Image (tube, grey):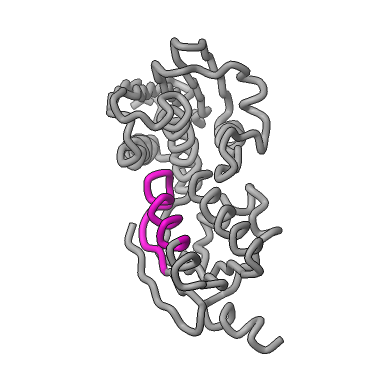
Amino acid sequence: MNLEKKIERLTLFLRLDGELDMHTSDLVRQAIDIEIEKRGIRTVILNLQNVQFIDSSGLGVILGRYKKLLSLGGKLKITNVPPNVYKIMELSGLPKIINFYDDETHAYEEGRRA
Amino acid sequence: MKSNQLALTFSSIAENVGIARLLIASVGAQLDLSLNDIEELKVAVSEAVSNAIIHGYRNDANHVVYLELEVMDDALKIVVKDEGYGISNVEQAMQPAFSTDPERMGLGFVFMQSFMDDLQVDSTIDIGTTVTMKKQLKQSSNASH
């Protein structure tokens, strides 16, 4: 799992590359939590374009970050989900809870306008 | 379809979940399964192996997980076995959204159930857990090869 981080005005852009399972979900949890705690990040935009696989561990870490950000008045947004990954997410009911966007620009713009 | 058997024994560490998935994906590809079927097999194996490591061995790396695959005439059988703590109430553990850990969704068994045609969980406290899953294979015209 490769993680690419970018921070812009208290928004963390995180691009994941690899398979999101029990092994790599720990890395993602740490990567997000450290920015929430140390930099006060409150919006996380998670780009899943290069994620080839997800299971319940991966879904759990995403839901966990969503809940954590929500409790701090923040937001988690998901973008660029590949169809096979979306199918698993849909079965879990995650898209009913978390907002999905076509790309990072849409995710970033939404909410800034409001 | 030719019958085939494979067994993989590996340390109970998270890195090996990906290796278990590679094995099932390769066998699925040999069986001419669709990409969607292979994806589902990968998720089912990933869940069973993750459960063995996280719950069976409570993340203790000093144990082994057994993965056995058997290609039969009409089905692919997958067995994931640990010699860990065991599950006290299998029925409860298999309920959707049941999880002993708030960071987890409790979907492991739900995915195994949805993606496989048959799921059996045998568990004994302090002996371990064996998950047996089956995927029906379509009888193809090249069965006589």
The percent coordinates of residue B40 (x first, y second) are: 50, 41
Image quadrant holding the N terminus of chain B, namely top left
The percent coordinates of residue A108 (x first, y second) are: 56, 81
Identify the residue at horizontal 51%, vertical 29% (top origin): B135
Identify the residue at horizontal 64%, vertical 82% (top origin): A110
Image quadrant holding the C terminus of chain B, namely top left
- Residue B78 found in image quarter: top left
| Side of B72 relative to B106 (left or right) | left
Task: Identify the magenta region.
Answer: A15-33
Q: Is residue A114 above or below residue B46?
A: below
- The reply to whether the magenta stretch includes residue A61 is no
- The reply to whether the magenta stretch includes residue A24 is yes
| Side of A29 relative to B25 (left or right) | right
- Residue A62 found in image quarter: bottom right
Identify the residue at horizontal 56%, vertical 42% (top origin): B104
The percent coordinates of residue B95 (x first, y second) are: 67, 30
- Asked if residue B83 shows in the view, the reply is yes
Q: Is residue A84 above or below residue A4?
A: above
